[in-house]
Image: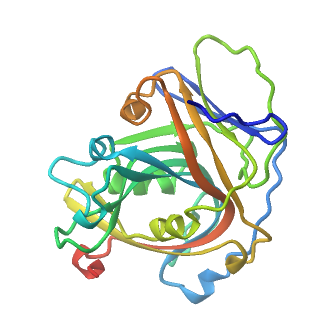
């Protein structure tokens, strides 16, 4: 049964996506108030890619067999994480102030990403990796995020149009139900007042090394992060809510099932500073 959330406590986050062959995605929120921090990590990590990230990081718990269905054939989760339910990381973020050692411009972008943690990519039984299965990446030329997704072999990359471009850092006023063109699909997450749970696990998952299957085999990367006050942001808001999908996103159907609803997602709305080293030898990331 869906938990009752009073409308006075809830906030409505709505994602509208067209069903054309390009599947453009539109994130609709009234107003856009960006609370951000200078990317000072670029000074400490001049040979890495670093960025400021604002948005929502959340964990959704799936039946283990459903989570396994998102992994490439032949890969599995660490036996130490073999439980009835497995976490899936869902991040909806605005990435900006991107700095790279080559001084080339990296466009700011919006991204919604679905990622599976605790994958035994090295088959050593102890090193956890993240696998990215689906990403909605804002359009732009050039698009650094789309290039990286291609290099990692992300199986479902959907180029998206976000309007307005917003980091979704602050809660907006609840949106009323509105009539939309029949070609549109809707993904809604009702987010009530905060509840404290899973935040440390969430942050640990975000910083797990990443792997993917590129055109030349397995590709790996290292991630470091500072969150919230540690990164110079004013606050972190812990959240809990349900997620409902209306419409068809083929790559996400195993996630939502029937009915297309996930109950009890946990997360945090915050800002972060991320440092990323891509194309690191995978064996160098072993624990």
Rendered view: 56 above or below 120 = above
- Nearest the viewer among 47 and 202 is 202
Outermost residue on the front side: it is 1
- For residue 34, which quarter of the picture? bottom right
- Nearest the viewer among 162 and 86 is 86
Classify residue 163 as left or right of residue 244: right
Number of marks in the image?
A: 0
Q: Residue at x 17, y 47 (%)?
A: 73
Q: Looking at the figure, which quarter contains the C terminus?
A: bottom left
Residue 178 in view: yes
- For residue 80, which quarter of the picture? bottom left
Q: Residue at x 69, y 34 (%)?
A: 4
Q: Residue at x 81, y 48 (%)?
A: 32
- Residue 8 image position (x, y, % from top left): 85, 38
Rendered view: 177 above or below 26 = above
- Residue 276 image position (x, y, % from top left): 47, 72
Residue 99 in view: no
Q: Residue at x 56, y 44 (%)?
A: 264
- Residue 42 image position (x, y, % from top left): 60, 81
- For residue 197, which quarter of the picture? bottom right
């Amino acid at each position: 049964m869906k938990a009752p959330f009073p409308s006075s406590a809830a906030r409505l986050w709505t994602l509208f996506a067209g069903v054309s062959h390009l599947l453009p995605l539109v994130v609709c929120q009234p107003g856009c108030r960006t609370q951000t921090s200078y990317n000072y990590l670029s000074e400490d990590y001049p040979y890495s890619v670093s960025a400021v990230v604002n948005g929502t990081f959340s964990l959704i718990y799936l039946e283990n067999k459903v989570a396994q269905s998102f992994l490439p054939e032949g890969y599995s989760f660490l036996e130490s994480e073999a439980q009835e339910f497995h976490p899936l990381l869902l991040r909806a973020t605005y990435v900006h102030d991107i700095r790279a050692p080559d001084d080339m411009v990296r466009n700011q972008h919006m991204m919604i990403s679905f990622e599976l943690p605790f994958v035994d990519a090295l088959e050593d039984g102890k090193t956890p990796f993240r696998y990215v299965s689906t990403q909605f990446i804002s359009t732009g030329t050039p698009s650094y995020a789309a290039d990286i997704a291609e290099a990692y072999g992300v199986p479902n990359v959907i180029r998206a149009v976000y309007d307005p471009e917003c980091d979704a850092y602050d809660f907006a006023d609840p949106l009323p139900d509105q009539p939309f063109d029949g070609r549109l699909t809707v993904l809604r997450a009702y987010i009530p007042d905060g509840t404290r749970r899973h935040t440390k696990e969430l942050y640990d998952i975000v910083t797990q090394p990443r792997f993917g299957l590129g055109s030349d085999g397995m590709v790996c990367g290292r991630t470091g992060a500072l969150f919230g006050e540690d990164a110079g942001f004013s606050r972190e808001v812990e959240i809990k809510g349900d997620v409902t999908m209306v419409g068809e996103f083929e790559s996400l159907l195993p996630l939502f099932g029937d009915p297309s609803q996930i109950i009890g997602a946990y997360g945090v709305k915050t800002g972060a500073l991320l440092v990323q080293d891509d194309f690191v030898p995978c064996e160098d990331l072993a624990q």
